[in-house]
C-alpha cells in the first residue's frame, strides 16, 4: 500500500505541474498580446469610419452645415514662398481654392458641380480631365465624411502604423473612379491624421502625403487647422485661422473664369 500511495502522489505532482505550466503559458501569452497591440484583433472598416464621423462632430453637426469658408496662410518653406489661402465650399459638391503667393501670383482651382478647372500664372487656365477630374470631383463632396461608404465602395483595414508618436489604424480606400488612397486614423481619437494618394496632373502622376493636424472645433465640427501636403518636390503648409459655416455663396464663385 505505501508504494501505491507513493505512485499516486507522484501522479498528482505531475498533474499539478502541468496545470501550473498551462496557467503560466496562458498568462505570458496574454501579457504578450497587451505588449503588442498591433497583434490584437483590428476593428472593422465600418467601426473605424463610424468613430471618425463621431470624432469630427457626428452626422447631425456635419449635415447641419450647408457651406464653409476657410481662410488662412500658406508657406512653401523649401523655396521661401508665402501667401494667403481661401477655400469656399458649398453643398452638395462645389468648391474653389484661391491662393495668392507673393512673387508668383494667384493660383485658383475649382469644381462647380460639373467642370473641374485650374488657373495659375505658369499654366494659365485649363480644364481638368481623366483621373485629375475624378479626384477633383471626389474632393468637392461637401458631406464626404458621412458618404464614405458610398464614395469608396472598397474599404480594407490593412493593419496598424505610427504617424509621428501616434498609433494609427491604416485603411486602404478605393473610390469608384480615381486611384486608391491610404488613410491613417488615430487609434485613440478616431481622427484622420494622414492621407496618402497618387494624383494626376499636367506633369503626370505624383505621390502626395497629406497630414491633417491641430484639429479645432468650428461650429461643432472638428476640422484640422494645419494641413501639410508633402510631395517629392516640396512641402506646402496651410494654417487655417478662420472658418465660417452657412455663409451665402453665389454659385458664380465656383465657375471657371472667362480667361
Image (cartoon, rainbow, N blue to C red):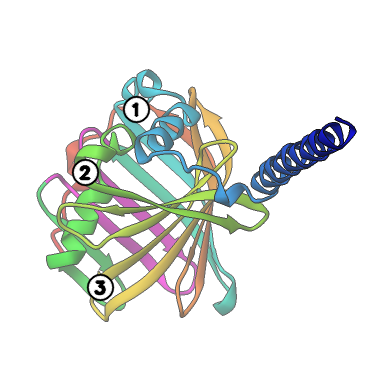
Specify the label residue 201 is tagged with.
3
Closer to viewer: mark 2 or mark 1: 2
Closer to viewer: mark 3 or mark 1: 3
Q: Is residue 91 visible?
A: yes
Residue at the image position 46 percent from the left and 25 percent from the top: 57
Mark 2 and mark 3 residues within 8 Å of each other at the beta carbon: no
The vertical placement of 37 against 246, above or below, is below
Residue 25 x/y as whole percent: 71, 46
Q: Is residue 253 visible?
A: no
Residue carrying label 1:
247
Closer to viewer: mark 2 or mark 3: 2
Query: How many neighbours does mark 1 have within 10 angstroms: few (below 14), some (14-19), or many (20 or more)?
Result: some
Query: For the residues marked 3 and 1, what is the alpha-carbon distance in whole angstroms?
Result: 31 Å
The vertical placement of 139 against 244, above or below, is below
Q: State the extent of the magenta-drawn residues as a range.
A: 90-113
Query: For the residues marked 2 and 1, what is the alpha-carbon distance in whole angstroms?
Result: 26 Å
Q: Specify whether residue 96 is painted magenta.
A: yes
Query: How many neighbours does mark 3 have within 10 angstroms: few (below 14), some (14-19), or many (20 or more)?
Result: some
Viewer-side residue, 51 vs 9? 9
Left-right relation of 246 to 165: left
Secondary structure state at the residue bearing disc 3 = strand
Left-right relation of 7 to 172: right
Query: How many neighbours does mark 2 have within 10 angstroms: few (below 14), some (14-19), or many (20 or more)?
Result: some
Which of the two labelled residues, at mark 2 and mark 3, occupies the earlier sequence position?
2
Specify the label residue 151 is tagged with.
2
Amino acid at each position: 500500500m505505501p508504494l501505491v500511495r507513493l505512485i499516486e502522489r507522484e501522479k498528482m505532482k505531475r498533474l499539478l505541474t502541468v496545470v501550473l505550466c498551462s496557467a503560466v503559458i496562458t498568462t505570458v501569452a496574454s501579457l504578450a498580446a497587451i505588449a503588442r497591440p498591433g497583434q490584437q484583433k483590428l476593428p472593422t472598416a465600418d467601426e473605424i469610419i463610424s468613430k471618425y464621423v463621431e470624432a469630427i462632430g457626428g452626422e447631425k453637426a456635419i449635415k447641419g452645415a450647408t457651406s464653409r469658408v476657410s481662410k488662412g496662410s500658406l508657406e512653401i518653406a523649401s523655396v521661401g514662398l508665402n501667401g494667403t489661402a481661401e477655400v469656399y465650399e458649398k453643398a452638395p459638391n462645389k468648391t474653389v481654392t484661391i491662393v495668392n503667393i507673393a512673387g508668383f501670383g494667384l493660383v485658383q482651382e475649382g469644381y462647380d458641380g460639373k467642370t473641374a478647372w485650374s488657373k495659375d500664372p505658369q499654366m494659365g487656365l485649363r480644364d481638368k480631365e481623366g483621373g485629375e477630374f475624378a479626384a477633383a470631383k471626389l474632393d468637392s463632396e461637401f458631406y464626404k465624411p458621412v458618404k464614405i461608404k458610398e464614395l469608396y465602395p472598397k474599404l480594407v483595414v490593412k493593419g496598424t502604423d505610427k504617424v509621428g508618436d501616434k498609433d494609427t489604424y491604416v485603411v486602404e480606400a478605393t473610390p469608384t473612379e480615381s486611384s486608391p488612397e491610404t488613410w491613417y486614423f488615430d487609434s485613440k481619437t478616431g481622427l484622420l491624421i494622414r492621407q496618402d494618394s497618387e494624383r494626376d496632373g499636367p506633369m503626370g502622376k505624383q505621390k502626395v502625403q497629406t497630414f491633417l493636424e491641430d484639429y479645432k472645433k468650428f461650429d461643432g465640427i472638428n476640422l484640422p487647422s494645419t494641413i501639410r501636403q508633402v510631395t517629392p518636390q516640396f512641402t506646402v503648409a496651410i494654417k487655417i485661422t478662420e472658418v465660417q459655416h452657412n455663409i451665402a455663396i453665389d454659385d458664380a464663385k465656383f465657375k471657371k473664369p472667362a480667361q
